[in-house]
Image (tube, grey):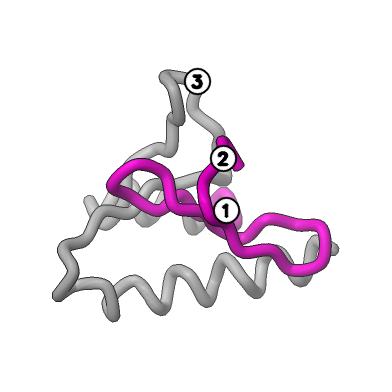
Amino acid sequence: MFGSPAVFMGRRMAFCVFKSGVGAKVPAADAARLIASGAATSFRPYGKPTMKEWIELQASQADVPKLAPVLSLALRYAKSSA
């Protein structure tokens, strides 16, 4: 996506690296919860409009393992949508 590394389940993208963050596609309710909690922001690559199922995660190198639950959710969501 956008010329950046991405992870797919079949033909469905689960998440991608974009600039200094990770964009992940999760169920809309989970996206809203993560954004409301401050754990994520809306994913808006190149200033595009907000996408209700896409979130952006930011983490320092030491915090990368904390992203695993959200990335796992994105993988499960992509698999269920395939």
Which residue: 74% across, 68% down? 9
Indicate which disc, 1 or 2, sits on the residue closer to the N terminus: 2
Q: Nearer the viewer, mark 1 or mark 2?
A: 2
**Left of 39 or right of it: where is 23?**
right
Tag of residue 25: 1
Membership of 5 in magenta stretch: yes
Q: Secondary structure at mark 1?
A: strand
* Residue type marked 3: Lys
Q: Secondary structure at mark 3?
A: loop
Mark 2 = which residue?
3
Crowd band around label 1 with a 10 angstrom C-alpha radius: few (<14), some (14–19), many (20+):
many
How far, Cα to Cα, is label 3 from label 2?
16 Å
Q: Quadrant of the N terminus?
A: top right
Mark 3 = which residue?
48
Crowd band around label 2 with a 10 angstrom C-alpha radius: few (<14), some (14–19), many (20+):
few
How far, Cα to Cα, is label 1 from label 2?
17 Å
* Residue type marked 1: Lys
* Residue type marked 2: Gly
**Left of 5 or right of it: where is 82?**
right
Which residue: 53% across, 55% down? 5
Rendering coords of residue 44 (x, y %): 44, 30
Q: Magenta region: which residues?
A: 1-29
The answer to which of 75 and 5 lies nearer the viewer is 5
**Left of 51 or right of it: where is 36?**
left
**Left of 17 or right of it: where is 72?**
right
Q: Quadrant of the C terminus?
A: bottom right
Rendering coords of residue 78 (x, y %): 71, 64
* Residue 34, quarter of the rendered image: bottom left
